[in-house]
Amino acid sequence: MSEGRDLLAVAAGGAIGSLGRWSIGLLASGAVWATVLVNVSGALAMGLLVAWLANGVGHPLVRPFVSVGLLGGWTTYSTFALDIHGLGSGGLVGLLGYLGATLGLGLTAACVGLLVGERLWRGDATTDAAIAEEEL
């Protein structure tokens, strides 16, 4: 029974995250930098979520709904790969800027989310264990 609830939580979160990402793409008129925005904000949100979940708070369906569903639908490696391919024909500067922004800002955002989350929710060594969870 639990697997069915997890599946529904992932599906609901994925639908919301994907629609949100699609909406950002529409608002940005297809600009590749919209992908940077969703990936970096998703990394920040994941860092905050991991720190919050490390304290053992929240409903058991929060992790599958938010981390796998919502943030999985919100962030996108496939669009990132297509953006890189498209930018590659336009010159090296734009391509490297996009790669640097996505990777650098994404990693920084995830770390900031973890640090802020640990301070907000008084995280400890359990945060490291939460990061290793299969669902993330």
Image: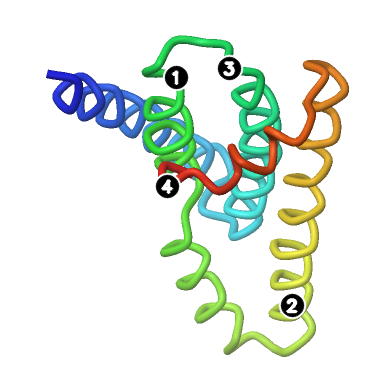
- Between label 2 and label 3, give the one nearer the viewer: 3
The crowding category of the residue bearing disc 4, from other C-alpha atoms within 10 Å (few below 14, some 14 to 19, many at least 20), is: few
Q: Which residue does the numbered mark 3 point to in the structure image?
A: 56
Q: Which residue does the numbered mark 1 point to in the structure image?
A: 62
Residue 80, compared with residue 120, is above or below; it is below
The kind of residue tagged 1 is Val
| Nearer-the-camera pick, 34 or 39 | 39
The crowding category of the residue bearing disc 2, from other C-alpha atoms within 10 Å (few below 14, some 14 to 19, many at least 20), is: some
The kind of residue tagged 3 is Gly
* Of callouts 4 and 2, the N-terminal one: 2
Residue positioned 72% across, 54% down in the render:
106
Mark 2 vs mark 3, CA separation in Å: 43 Å
Instruction: Give the percent coordinates (x, y) of residue 2.
Output: 19, 20
Residue 129, compared with residue 86, is above or below; it is above
- Between label 3 and label 1, give the one nearer the viewer: 3
Instruction: Give the percent coordinates (x, y) of residue 21.
Output: 47, 39
Dot 3 falls on a residue whose secondary structure is loop
* Of callouts 2 and 1, the N-terminal one: 1
Residue 94 circle label: 2
The crowding category of the residue bearing disc 1, from other C-alpha atoms within 10 Å (few below 14, some 14 to 19, many at least 20), is: some
